[in-house]
Image: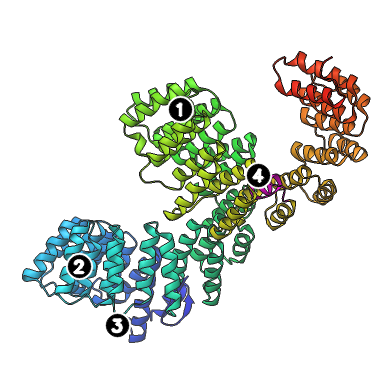
Amino acid sequence: MIRCLAGEVELSLDAISRKVRPLNGNLHEHEASYFLEVLKECSTRRFLREGRIIHSLLVIRYGVSLPITFSNCLIQMYGHCGHTKDAQKSFAAIPRPSNISWTVLIRAFGHNGQVNMAKHAFSCAKDADVVTWNSMIGVYAKSKDTLSAMDLFERMQLGGPAPTAVTFVCIVDACSDLHTGFLIHSLTIMFQYEGNVTVANAIITMYGRCKNLVDAKRTFAGMTVKNLVTWSTLISQHTQNEKFIDAMQLFQDMLDENIVPNHITCVTALEACTKLGKILESQLIHLISVECHYEKNLPLANALINNYGKCGSLSDAKAVFFRIPSKNIISWSSLMGAYTEARLYEEAMQVFHQMQSESVKPDEVVYLHVLDACVGLEDIDAGQEIHACLIESGYASVIALANALINFYGKCGNLSHARVVFLNLNSRNVISWSTLISSFAQNGHDKEALSLLFEMQTVHIEPNDITIVGVLDAINTVVEGHIMHTILVFGKYEQSHRVQAALVNFYDTMGCHYDAMYTFRMITEKDAISWTSGIAACAHSENLREALNLFYQMLDHEVMPSSVTFVCLLDGCSNLAALEDGRKLHGAIIDSGHDNDKVVVNALITMYGKCGDVRDSVTSFWSNPQRDLVSWSAVLSSCSLNGQAAAALKLFNHLQGLELTMNAVIFLCILASCSHGGLLEEGIWYFVLFTRWHGLFPAEEHFACLIDLYGRAGQVDVAEQLIELIPFTKVASAVASLLGACRIQGDFDSGLRCAKILFDMDPYDTAAYIDAANLCASVNLLEW
């Protein structure tokens, strides 16, 4: 079907053929106009087959020598469809080509990257006008040939036509360095084109491309007339140069000037919102797009799905997806990405299966999301099925997907399959080697990981920062770490932000706080990962003041904290029960838009619970729209720790009505709540409930809670009998719990037996001696 723009109707090729009158002779004026519009539509939409049929119909009417207007349209159509030979044939059939014909031919060659052919056509064009010159400069600009474009521009000034605004737009587009850009900017001023909006927009783009946003903004500020393209260009350049805060401010300034954005501007602004995690601003852009009737624009809808997924608003992402009237593969992959971002891996797999049921063929990005979901689920069977699909569809040889497979098998601990995928690769890149090295290192095969590093260098593949990070995981001693650090300094790998952060994390893991902070302070240009590594090192060493100081320095340097940053700080507040600091962090989390991040909210729930603020812990829990088992465990633990047994059991009863599979952590939280609340009968009931109904086998901690429950209820003899029956060899935590209960009940004899059991298990357990001393003190007996 071809849509005729002139008549605003859709006509089939049969209808087009019926337009041709059976008699010979020229077309009527309205018929000629019709065919020109159809040819232009074929050119725009790359309809080669339909264009050829129109060409045949015209030859039937006119013969080989077509009117020049039709020939020019045919040259353009064949050029856009990638058939320059047919374009040349159409051009050769013109008896006396005009400048327009030469120009269209030059553009056809340039569109297909045939610069030499375009150059030859330009040299053959006699009396070329300014449009032809501009077209040739445009060809050089598209091929990034700055020198040839500048040379032609100089020839134009010496003996060619006077340059126009289009000339300067073309020559500015050819600029690849700032020096040439300054020169051309000065020429636009000399030729008095600096006030031309189109030229100024091109100059702003050029400065942004050269990463000189200062002069881009200066050019913008000097413009007397600014249109939508001007604003959109400046916003886009700031986004591309990762100045996301400035891009959002420019978008707001544009709205303040009552300039209505188009869908392209909205997509660009959404990209900045995505990077900043600004959910409210994203929703504002969504509202603007609805008011402007852009909501059905597919690129914008896909950008919204991606944005909401990255910002943690899965409900909004799903709403946008289901409102798209005609979804493409990007829509499906964006929704899958939103689910994997939210760690809802089962739902991501469901989207994949639904996509397949609707006969939508997966692409590389979809398969990457599916493999991420398989990693999250640790589902080796599902991953192997995807592997088979990749082989069947021919995607197994795509290196990005092969690397994802290596990562999947490595994360699932199947190193033999990971190595097989690696060995089957015809061409391995540095990511392939790095992924395999990380897989071995993360699974405790340190020697194999280091061996792979040396093997990698023997095939002349230089390691990158990802490789080094993987190797650092394979180092287990401080001495080896210092040696590797020295090697990295001499190899200049230490300059990488990722490597520097990994070194800080390594020293932090090994307990070397001084080395960790020294390495952190040596980082000259810190990014979010670098700052987070330093903050984590301080938090782990319980130096909360220094961690918070680094956090505020991070904000002063306009570096946006990540969810990991906030989790590290909240963990520090939890360990030190620093409630006020935790509340200040909560405010910063809301300001940064991370209050919708499930992981951050779970850390908030835990922080408030450990700091004794059950009310805010429960409030944070209910404010989390994406509550999972970790969220439930956190809030139940908060209630348990603070003696709120009734609240914990009420929450658990609510949890039972949801379709969530119980786990051992929930089991432990409920038993602990019953133990702290002295609820013996309820504790026994829930113990039976979890073991029989939910099929969970009790671990050492669960038996310890049950023994503690009997001990607190005064049934020490039952607790002792239970110790003899549990399927562990004298569980230390259980015996210690009973010893504490004996002290509370004043049962010295039972407490003495428990203490002797603990001493036999570990003669150097200082906690056991302290508990025994407290038992003796409780009955006024310090020796026995």
Q: Earlier in the sequence, mark 1 or mark 4?
A: 1
Q: Residue at x 35, y 38 (%)?
A: 495
Please tell me whether residue 43 is drawn above or below residue 489 in the rendered image.
below
Q: Residue at x 49, y 33 (%)?
A: 513
Alpha carbon distance from label 4 to label 2 = 60 Å
- Asked if residue 425 can be seen in this view, the reply is no
Q: Earlier in the sequence, mark 3 or mark 4?
A: 3
Element carrying mark 3: loop
Residue behind mark 2 = 185
Element carrying mark 2: helix
Element carrying mark 1: helix
Question: Residue 256 lies in what quarter of the image?
Answer: bottom left
Q: Amino acid at mark 2?
A: His
Residue behind mark 4 = 577
Q: Position of residue 77 (x, y in %)?
A: 32, 67
Q: Earlier in the sequence, mark 4 or mark 2?
A: 2
